Image (cartoon, helix red, strand yellow):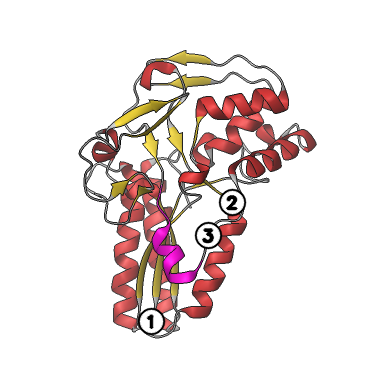
Amino acid sequence: MAGQGAGSRQLLEHNLLGTVNLLEAAARRRAGIVILSTSRVYSIQALASLPLRERGIAYEIDTAADLPQGVDKRGIREDFSTAAPVSLYGATKLASEALAFEYADLAGVPVVVNRCGVLAGAGQFGRADQGIFSWWIHSWARRRPLRYIGFGGRGLQVRDCLHPADLARLVILQMQSSTGPCRSLLNVSGGAASATSLAELSAWCSSRLGSHDVAGTSEERPYDVPWVVLDHARATSLHGWTPEHHAHAIFEELACHAERHPDWLDITGG
């Protein structure tokens, strides 16, 4: 699927029209549907307006403040706002979710939509839009320039991280358990336990890979948000699933991959 770095026409054709082609094929075969969606479907304005406080070198939800629907200290739930803007990328994913439910209803087959946190693991493309954790660690290992952008330029912005093997394990459970018409919409993430700021990631990299300077800029970009951590409680309740790969184990896997493949960023377009 096309990421946020793709041109707008290509993004729409790949993410939306590509989904339509797959949904039509599934409907013809009366096959169940599992859609891998993204946290980018959640409203940028709503995310940017979340009450936050600093915890060491990271943001966290300010639980003493009035919180909007769909979020608490464990993270963002599936009922959090998806009002525009969500970026063109997020819009194609949100539209794909709606189309999947429509096609599944027409065909009378099960559909599951998994809204994923940031995927991170060895072998990932060395590009920021394909996974910030992978790109940051590979860039650190190669001593490439790195910057904290926005939010005071201190790297306090936070994401959760999810290993692909944990996602695959859940998808297998869903394929085995979904029969007949059913509709599931789930956040799938490393959750609050994996929540890591860029500054915390840099501290880990410095300890594991050696020192490296990171610049900071207060430049603001329209689709950047300071804190996105998905709550996977519904997936845990429905399927007994929890992520098995913890954040530091994922980072170590990425660091080992970076050491074994020093040309990875060049090969994959980073």
Instruction: Classify mark 2: helix, strand or loop.
Output: loop
- The circle drawn on residue 5 is none
Amino acid under label 2? His
- The circle drawn on residue 242 is 3
23 up-or-down from 231: above or below: below
Q: Residue 52 or 108: which is nearer the viewer?
A: 52
Q: Which residues are magenta?
A: 230-240
The residue that disc 1 covers is 109
Residues at marks 3 and 2 touching, judged by CB atoms closer than 8 Å: no
What's the CA distance linking mark 1 and mark 2? 28 Å
What's the CA distance linking mark 3 and mark 2? 11 Å
Amino acid under label 1? Val
Amino acid under label 3? Thr
- At 41% across and 59% down in the image, what residue appears? 233
The residue that disc 2 covers is 163
- Decide: few, some or many residues near mark 2? Use Cα within 10 Å; few <14, some 14-19, many ≥20: many
- At 43% across and 40% down in the image, what residue appears? 4
- At 34% across and 84% down in the image, what residue appears? 108
